[in-house]
Image (cartoon, rainbow, N blue to C red):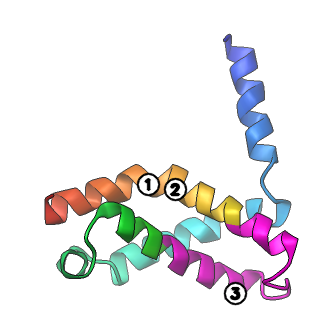
Amino acid sequence: MNLQEHIRRILKEETKMNTRLRRRLGMVDDEFHRLMSAVYRPDIICGYYRSGEELLDVVGEAVIEFMYYNHFADIDDNSGEWGEIYYDMVKYIKDKYGEKIKEYYHINCGN
């Protein structure tokens, strides 16, 4: 695959994301970092979570809940639009932070 095809594929994937969410990705990142520094500190995570994957799921859900109540509350949480935004956020969080969280857990808690 040449570079132009690769760029087109990446741009196509990025434009699939819900527009309202795409405009708020910085807020997703900010909340994720806030939670990691204030709530999910190394001295706490080892006693409560069995793996980095579990920690990622918990932090991801907390971020999504924050985003819903602060930025998407006007959308019915049983609607297809919210389902689309929810899955876009899950994918974004796992793609961007998945390996970092697993490594963070491993460094602080071991295997």
Verify CB contact (< 8 Å) between mark 2 and mark 3. no
Left of 27 or right of it: where is 36? left
Q: Quadrant of residue 55?
A: bottom left
Task: Say which quarter of the image contains residue 84.
Answer: bottom right
Q: Which residue is mark 2?
A: 94
Q: Sequence-wise, which precedes: disc 1 or disc 3?
A: 3
**Please, what is the three-letter code of the amino acid marked with disc 1?**
Gly
Q: Quadrant of residue 56?
A: bottom left
How many residues crowd mark 3 within 10 Å: few (<14), some (14–19), many (20+)? Answer: few
For residue 54, side relative to residue 17 (left or right): left
Residue 25 in sight here: no
Question: Crowding near pointer 1: few (<14 within 10 Å), some, many (20+)?
Answer: some
Q: Secondary structure at mark 1?
A: helix
Can you identify the residue that label 3 sits on? Answer: 70
Q: Residue at x 55, y 65 (%)?
A: 29
Range of magenta residues: 60-86
State the image coordinates of residue 58 (x, y, percent, origin top left). Answer: 44, 75
Q: Quadrant of the C terminus?
A: bottom left
| Quadrant assignment for the N terminus | top right
**Distance of label 1 from label 2 (alpha carbons):** 5 Å
Reply above or below: 69 against 25.
below
The numbered dot on residue 98 is: 1
Q: Is residue 102 above or below residue 51?
A: above
